[in-house]
Image (spheres, rainbow, N blue to C red):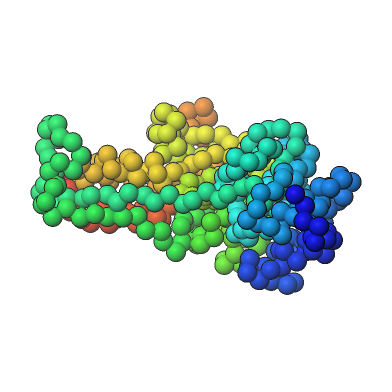
Amino acid sequence: MLDPSVQFTKQNLFTHPLNPALGWKQGDEEAKWAQKAIETLVKKLKKRKGVMERLQYALAHPGEPSECISIPRSLDGRIQVSHRKGFPHVIYCRVWRWPDLQSHHELKPLECCKLPFDSKQKEICINPYHYRRVDYPVLPPVLVPRQSEYPDMNDVMPPYASSEGSGAQSISYQEPKYWCTVVYYEMNTRVGEAYFASSPSVLIDGFTNPSRNSDRFSLGILSNVNRTPTIENTRKQIGKGIHLYTVAGDTYIECLSDSSVFVQSRLCSEIHGFHPTTVVKIPPACSLRVFSNREFARILHLTVPLGVEAVYDIVKMCTIRLSFVKGWGAEYHRQDVTSTPCWIEVHLRGPLFWLDRVLRQMGPSPNPVSSVS
């Protein structure tokens, strides 16, 4: 399989992450990280006969079949590159194919791969051409009739049955510039300004990064003159905090802190059959899918025929609440999130904008409220 004209050198590999077509810039912090990742890989492969040549062949012939290039799986499946830990197949797909890759949820192995990451074998294939990127799903538009066209709640009618040919509007999902807004609270007091996330991957930590334009929201820099010792001690334990990211319409939260975080997501509860206000504990180094655009689209399609008040009710699904270190809910003496020392509220702007357009088309509630009702 190896092309005799392909001569392997360590320098050959270093040309790939610095290719301007991939978005890498010479001297850039991320480019330095990519070079460090290659050095780490070279150290792992150089004692294995023929493996480095196979990697060079795969990189030089991206459109042709190539063999698995594997490294031993660590206890947690991750490797460390320059103080950053990550899954190896994600790291090297990012280095040589997709610099904007954020998570293993974005990757699926090809059928030809014998050692894919998900197989849990002792070896992990890191050949970037043995994986494909998950396509972003296209959400079906919602057909919204005018307010006067809604059926009586006692009638049994299929969705949209009354809207055929009667001026119903098709309303599609549109991705906004900022996919979510994060607001920080201490007990029942909002602290600081809202953070608007444009990057699909955001770190929310307890440190003191002052930048408002990065993919980090550091809570440690925010001040509150009414801060209590309990809040202060909790803030010190946030540490690396959480990784909040969106992949192909799904939103995930990964706990990077040494302490657990606690999440309330009504859509997550709906998917798993929990009570709507269930609070889920995410231990360190674990992650949870907290929102799905596809599932939300399904619920929205089913809810529109029930009327404007039913649609208003699912607005709550677009907000996710998370507390650091301290939990709340049925199993705790703190019954409400506002009783926890440090917590955030995440507003998912894409679904909220979609609901806004649907509600504007639907018109006001047929059950108006007066000053004496």
Q: Nearer the viewer, residue 309 or 67?
A: 67
Quadrant of residue 37 within the rendered picture:
bottom right
| Residue 67 % position (x, y) | 72, 45
Q: Is residue 198 left or right of residue 77?
A: left
Give coordinates of residue 269: x percent, y percent: 43, 34
Total count of labels: 0
Q: How far from the left and from the top, in percent, is residue 94?
A: 65, 56
> Residue at horizontal 35%, vertical 45%?
297
> Residue placed at 51% from the left, 62% from the top?
198
In the image, is residue 205 above or below residue 74? below
Above or below for 121 versus 219: above
Residue 285 visible in rendering? no
Res 330 visible: yes
Residue 152 versus residue 329: which sits nearer the camera? 152
Q: From the image, which quarter does the C terminus lie in?
A: top left
Q: Position of residue 222 (x, y in %)?
A: 59, 59
* Residue at the image point whose x is 47% and y is 39% from the top: 264
Depth check: 206 or 158 in front?
Answer: 158
Quarter location, residue 12: bottom right
Q: In the figure, is residue 152 to the left or right of 341?
A: left
Q: Residue at 64% x, 47% y: name it.
A: 130
Q: Vertical placement of 178 versus 287: above or below?
A: below
Which one is nearer the viewer's eye here, 93 or 240?
A: 93
Q: Residue furthest right?
A: 47
